[in-house]
Image: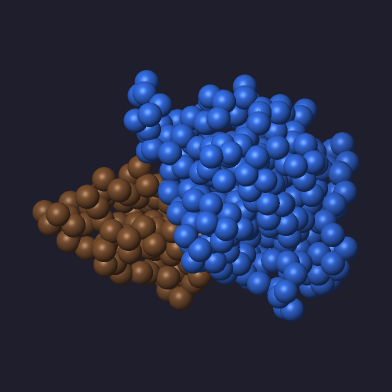
């Protein structure tokens, strides 16, 4: 089961909007870290994803294991939140 | 392979959900022609990831690409268009029906509109693939924020390269714009660009070709290039590539006729050589690669599709 979801985004990122819309359709709530408003958290996004890009979606399960999905990647995102 | 009679059937399937596709869907669904769209990326296509659209009619001060894409999508959905987030792998012509192999399985359509547009092309230089998303990028609006107070290289000299270079100045301290020959961007964009050149935010390097994107310890450190025939290094923290477009037509290359660069050839009715399969927008040969043209073509395609469907109706259905 999903415990919580965090999405790292920017103001202008279309793929971030798609991730949020997808989670909305699946009735998942999520926290948003907007890197335009919180640039100090860029290093955190980079450490999690290993990539200089957004969206980065962090799905934390009930057992506190984490899955990090880089980009708008439904083949990874859909099973991660199932 | 499933029997044809068992497969889901649709009046129109549109492959893609960019401006041409969404515009076509607005017209077809408004006329009660059931329409399903398949989008493997973002509805709105490249328009959605474009920072700012300044030349789409009706917006006095321009409009954010994402805002325009979202509005087109919502308008199409308001009339009943259904957008499925998935991919069409191939299309087979079975006469009155077209069979589509998709991420949701096989399905049939009376008409298919191919509006898959294009993706940004890669330079093919050594290091480009290796450092993708680790210093090499194709989406300024997605990844530009990682380059606050950093130095960047932008590759390309067309509208996208100039526009995205200007966008990236909100983050980067300086941008080297590497242009293979000369700037091909519109006069308006070139005028905008000059302001940033004057402010020494952007330096343009003409007659410059890329030899390698060089990294150290997993990060990009420079672009090795040839400028005016001389080897020249451009130290940088990141590279954004906008060197043209690559048509998304491979999945139908054996079905329809393509031109020499892979764009789909269609007649004056926007129909390909296969009856019932249409093409519109940036994927069509001789397209002008403009959002306004794409939405216009989408509307035209929808009206031609309606004519086609009326023509193929059995008299007993009238």
- Left or right, B71 with respect to A46, comes to right
- Left or right, A43 with respect to B263, comes to left
Q: Give how far across and how far down residue B184 sits, in percent.
A: 85, 52
The relative height of residue B155 versus residue B56 in the rendered view (above or below) is above
Figure quadrant of the N terminus of chain B = top left
Is any atom of residue B191 visible in this view?
yes
Which residue is at the front of the view, B72 or B25? B25
Q: Give how far across and how far down residue A46 sits, in percent.
A: 40, 56
Which color scheme did the rendering employ for the protein? by chain
The relative height of residue A38 versus residue B243 in the rendered view (above or below) is below
The structure residue drawn at horizontal position 72% and vertical position 74%, both measured from the top left corner, is B58
Q: Which residue lies furthest to the front in this view?
A: B316
Q: Give how far across and how far down residue B55 sits, in percent.
A: 76, 67
The structure residue drawn at horizontal position 65% and vertical position 31%, both measured from the top left corner, is B275
Q: Which residue lies furthest to the bottom in this view?
A: B60
Number of disc labels: 0
In the picture, which chain is brown? Answer: A
The relative height of residue B248 versus residue B155 in the rendered view (above or below) is above
In the picture, which chain is blue? Answer: B
The structure residue drawn at horizontal position 53% and vertical position 24%, both measured from the top left corner, is B94
The structure residue drawn at horizontal position 67% and vertical position 46%, both measured from the top left corner, is B307
The relative height of residue B174 versus residue B155 in the rendered view (above or below) is below
Which residue is at the front of the view, B18 or A42? B18
Q: Give how far across and how far down residue A58 sits, in percent.
A: 30, 57
Is any atom of residue B46 visible in this view?
no
């Amino acid at each position: 089961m999903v415990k919580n979801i965090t999405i790292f985004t920017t103001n202008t990122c279309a793929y971030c909007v798609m991730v949020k819309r997808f989670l909305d359709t699946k009735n998942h709530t999520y926290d948003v870290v907007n890197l335009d408003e919180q640039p100090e958290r860029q290093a955190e996004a980079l450490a999690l994803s290993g990539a200089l890009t957004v969206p980065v979606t962090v799905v934390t399960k009930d057992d506190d294991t984490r899955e990090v999905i880089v980009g708008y990647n439904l083949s990874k995102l859909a099973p991660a939140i199932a | 392979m499933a029997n044809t009679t068992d497969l889901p059937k649709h009046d129109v399937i549109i492959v893609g959900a960019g401006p041409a596709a969404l515009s076509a869907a607005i017209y077809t669904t408004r006329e009660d022609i059931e329409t399903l769209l398949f989008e493997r990326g973002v509805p709105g296509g490249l328009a959605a990831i474009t920072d700012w659209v300044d030349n789409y009619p009706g917006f006095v001060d321009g409009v954010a690409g994402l805002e325009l894409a979202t509005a087109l999508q919502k308008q199409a959905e308001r009339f009943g268009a259904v957008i499925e987030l998935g991919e069409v792998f191939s299309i087979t012509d079975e006469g009155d029906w077209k069979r589509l192999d998709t991420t949701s399985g096989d399905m049939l359509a009376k008409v298919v509109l191919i509006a898959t547009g294009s993706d940004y092309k890669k330079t093919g230089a050594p290091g480009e693939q290796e450092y993708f998303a680790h210093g090499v990028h194709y989406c300024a609006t997605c990844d530009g924020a990682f380059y606050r107070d950093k130095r960047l290289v932008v590759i390309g000299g067309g509208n996208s390269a100039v526009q995205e270079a200007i966008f990236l100045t909100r983050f980067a301290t300086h941008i080297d714009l590497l242009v293979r020959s000369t700037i091909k961007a519109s006069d308006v964009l070139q005028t905008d660009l000059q302001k940033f050149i004057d402010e020494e935010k952007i330096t343009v390097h003409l007659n410059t070709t890329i030899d390698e994107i060089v990294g150290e310890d997993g990060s990009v450190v420079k672009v090795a290039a040839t400028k005016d025939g001389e080897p020249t290094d451009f130290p940088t923290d990141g590279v954004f590539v906008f060197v043209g477009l690559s048509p998304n037509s491979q999945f139908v290359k054996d079905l329809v006729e393509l031109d020499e660069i892979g764009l789909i050839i269609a007649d004056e009715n926007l129909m390909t050589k296969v009856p019932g399969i249409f093409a519109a927008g940036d994927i069509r040969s001789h397209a002008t690669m403009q959002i306004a043209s794409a939405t216009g073509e989408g509307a035209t395609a929808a009206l031609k599709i309606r004519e086609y469907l009326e023509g193929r109706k059995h008299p007993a259905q009238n």
